[in-house]
Image (tube, rainbow, N blue to C red):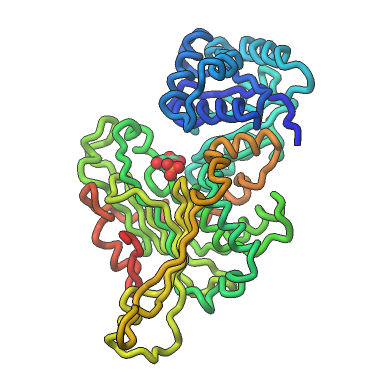
Amino acid sequence: EQLDPHVIVLFGATGDLARRKLLPGMAHLVLSDLAPDIRIVGTSLEDMSDEEFRAFARSAVEQFGHKQLSPEQWDLFDDNLTYVAQSAGPAALAAAVERAEQALGGDVRRLHYLSVPPKAALPVIDMLREADLVARARVVMEKPFGTDLASAIALNARVHETFKESQVFRIDHFLGKEAAQNILAFRFANGLFEPIWNRNFIDHIQIDIPETLGLDQRANFYESTGAYKDMVVTHLFQVMAFVAMEPPTALEPRAISEEKNKVFRSLLPIRPSTVVRGQFTGYTSLPGVAPDSDTETFIAMECRLDNWRWAGVPFYLRTGKEMAEGKRIISIAFKEAPRSMFPANSGVGQSGPDHLTFDLADESKVSLSFYGKRPGPGMRLQKLSMQFSTGETESAGDVLEAYERLILDAMRGDHTLFTTAEGIESLWDRSAQLLDNPPPVKPYAPGTWGPNAIHQLVAPHAWRLPF
Ligand code: BG6
């Protein structure tokens, strides 16, 4: 399918996300021919010439791109970049977009990518309206989409004064990961697992995203966000929806959002008593952090979905910074056999229940662990594992980085992997008790799995990690 030519207006063009993900991703889209006809107008609070911006983009692609560019390729990409400082005002922005459109020719569409902090999003939208850049446009917004129900409703209402919901793409890059989409393929393309995908066969589910990453560069931003708003409301809940949703009537955006939104509506309000908030020791000495900060750098929680499929099945979520290992797993624990005929010393039950595990790492994996016989005399059991990894398939080279995939989808106008205003509002609604009465943060040492209270939270179950 032919993609219309696009001018991408990148707000926050000199920021961290642009450098690490967006510019390298856009370079890859241009050069891999997935989106050959794009021009990028970078803009931010900094003053910069076109040449300086090109140099900035070049070093970003060299440092963070997953493919290195040859000089010829670089020249090709370079030509697509121009820069206009945000302080130059709406008229200057409109003129820069117009020049880029003329250079492309034809029926050009606009993609406004708002890689800016939440406070800056509305002024940018006002600027787009003043610059008359709303027609033929789509707008990509970065999280957080509000910080509670009232602010999310207000933000959505303000955005809708300028853009129709069909023009808005709220990005959640976890859904752009191949492995996250593989959950949909796995569940709905096979007859094997869906019949057991419910409370009759599944004991509990863990969505566990520990990070070793610290906050040295971002503490200032993080101070007003914390793990719940930074990770759970967007990434973890979104992934949970893919795991928990009913089969959609079709693999199309409206049907999928409807099912995801039903999951969010069935989420029982998060009770503070089922949440462990943690803060790694040393966080309060980072620049930009209050000495008595109560911001959580870690969170573990139990959630429940109040519907037929999942009644009684706990969902345990965990994520945090400065933890022992970096992993992104979804682990489905199946119920044990109804009675065991194996002798007590056979090892049955010793290694926990059977599990299906989705690893959302860049090279995504799905594995199934179950008991089998250990070779040798007698009947001794051991855990065996069947594993599939995208890295081993022929199409491994076709993997798109999450942001690339989502930028491409936004240009195509495909909302499948984006979040709706309604979905976000339900999540904030279910978060109200926790936001109003957060339990105090508990300290944990960097390089660990979080405060001790995490074990009690999931008892009698146990955390699956570390493997
Ligand atoms: C971002 C969060 O959205 O996701 C970061 O703001 C987090 O705090 C990051 O580190 C994790 O993303 P990924 O793709 O590296 O797992």
| Residue occupying the point 31% across, 82% down | 376
Residue 377 horizontal side relative to residue 406, left or right: left
Q: Which quadrant of the rendered structure holds the C terminus? A: bottom left
x, y percent for residue 54 = 50, 14
| Residue occupying the point 63% across, 49% down | 422
x, y percent for residue 39 = 63, 19
Q: Residue 227 or 204: which is nearer the viewer? A: 204
Outermost residue to the front: 376
Whether residue 233 is visible to the viewer of this picture, yes or no, is no
The vertical placement of 344 against 405, above or below, is below
Residue 425 horizontal side relative to residue 286, left or right: right
| Residue occupying the point 40% across, 78% down | 372
| Residue occupying the point 33% across, 58% down | 276
Whether residue 446 is visible to the viewer of this picture, yes or no, is yes
Q: Residue 278 or 73: which is nearer the viewer? A: 73
x, y percent for residue 269 = 49, 61
Write down the quadrant of residue 310 in the picture.
bottom right
x, y percent for residue 86 = 54, 15
The vertical placement of 82 against 314, above or below, is above
Q: Which quadrant of the rendered structure holds the N terminus? A: top right
User: Where is ligand 1, by quadrant?
Assistant: top left
